[in-house]
Image (spheres, grey):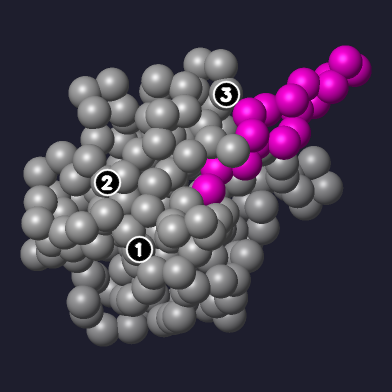
């Protein structure tokens, strides 16, 4: 899973698609029929004393509307969830299943490696993670002391592609860097590999885009 942002509206609405409806198709992208359009239903509203709220981005299909799943790549900056890429087409997560859309030259695609490099100390195992960590991509289980569970802080050391699958080498940390004032600097308690994505396409590791 990577992120996809459309730049045409992000400067004023920080949305992930153009205010002009975008078509979402089922694969194969060049031959499929449209299954709906992605639209910004409501732009950000800014409170007089700070803060913003109200951005609503949906997929419209035959008079029905479903919220577009997103993840934040930066504070208050949502992006569509990319599951696959093929020649300028991006398969994105929908509320039910997935669909393809074609990027324009102004759109921005953010690979996992780039996202993790920006937030190296704020990453954790996602609730899609199913252990154990491995000695190498596709290898045998690694000897990692702590019990692995969703929310456990990890640090991504390397992102590697093996065949058509992406793998992450992570260091399992004793505690979050956010608790350093109380518990001291975190220690590395084990290192191993895990698939970057679950079978559903969701990420095994994600980060806090809003800091501690």
Q: How far apart in space, not on screen, are marks 2 and 3 (Cα)?
A: 20 Å
* Percent position of residue 74, x then y: 55, 33
Look at mark 1 in the image and give the residue it sits on: 98
- Classify the position of the N terminus by image quarter: bottom left
Check contact, mark 2 vs mark 3: CB within 8 A. no
Look at mark 3 in the image and give the residue it sits on: 13
Check contact, mark 2 vs mark 1: CB within 8 A. no
Q: How far apart in space, not on screen, are marks 1 and 3 (Cα)?
A: 24 Å
The reply to whether the magenta stretch includes residue 48 is yes
- The disc at residue 101 is 2
Q: Residue furthest front?
A: 63
Q: Residues within 10 Å of mark 1 (few under 14, many from 20)?
A: some
> What span is in magenta?
42-58
Quick one: 8 or 202, which is closer to the camera?
Answer: 8
| Residue 30 located left or right of residue 4 | left
In the rendered view, tell whether residue 78 sits above or below residue 155: above
The reply to whether the magenta stretch includes residue 25 is no
Q: Secondary structure at mark 2?
A: strand
State the residue at coordinates (35%, 39%): 22
């Amino acid at each position: 899973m990577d992120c996809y942002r459309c730049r045409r509206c992000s400067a004023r609405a920080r949305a992930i698609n153009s205010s002009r409806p975008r078509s979402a198709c089922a694969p194969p992208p060049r031959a499929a029929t449209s299954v709906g359009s992605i639209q910004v239903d409501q732009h950000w509203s800014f409170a007089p004393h700070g803060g913003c709220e109200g951005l609503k981005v949906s997929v419209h299909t035959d008079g029905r509307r479903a919220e577009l799943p997103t993840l934040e790549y930066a504070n208050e900056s949502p992006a569509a969830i990319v599951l696959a890429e093929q020649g300028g087409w991006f398969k994105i997560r929908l509320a039910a299943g997935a669909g393809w859309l074609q990027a324009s030259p102004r759109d921005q695609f953010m690979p996992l490696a780039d996202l993790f490099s920006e937030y190296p100390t704020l990453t954790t195992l996602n609730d899609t993670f199913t252990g154990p960590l491995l000695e190498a991509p596709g290898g045998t289980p690694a000897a990692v002391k702590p019990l692995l569970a969703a929310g456990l802080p990890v640090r991504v050391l390397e992102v590697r592609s093996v065949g058509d699958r992406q793998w992450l080498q992570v260091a399992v940390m004793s505690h979050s860097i956010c608790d350093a004032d109380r518990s001291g600097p975190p220690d590395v308690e084990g290192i191993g590999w895990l698939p970057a994505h679950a079978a559903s396409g969701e990420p095994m590791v994600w980060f806090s885009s809003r800091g501690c």
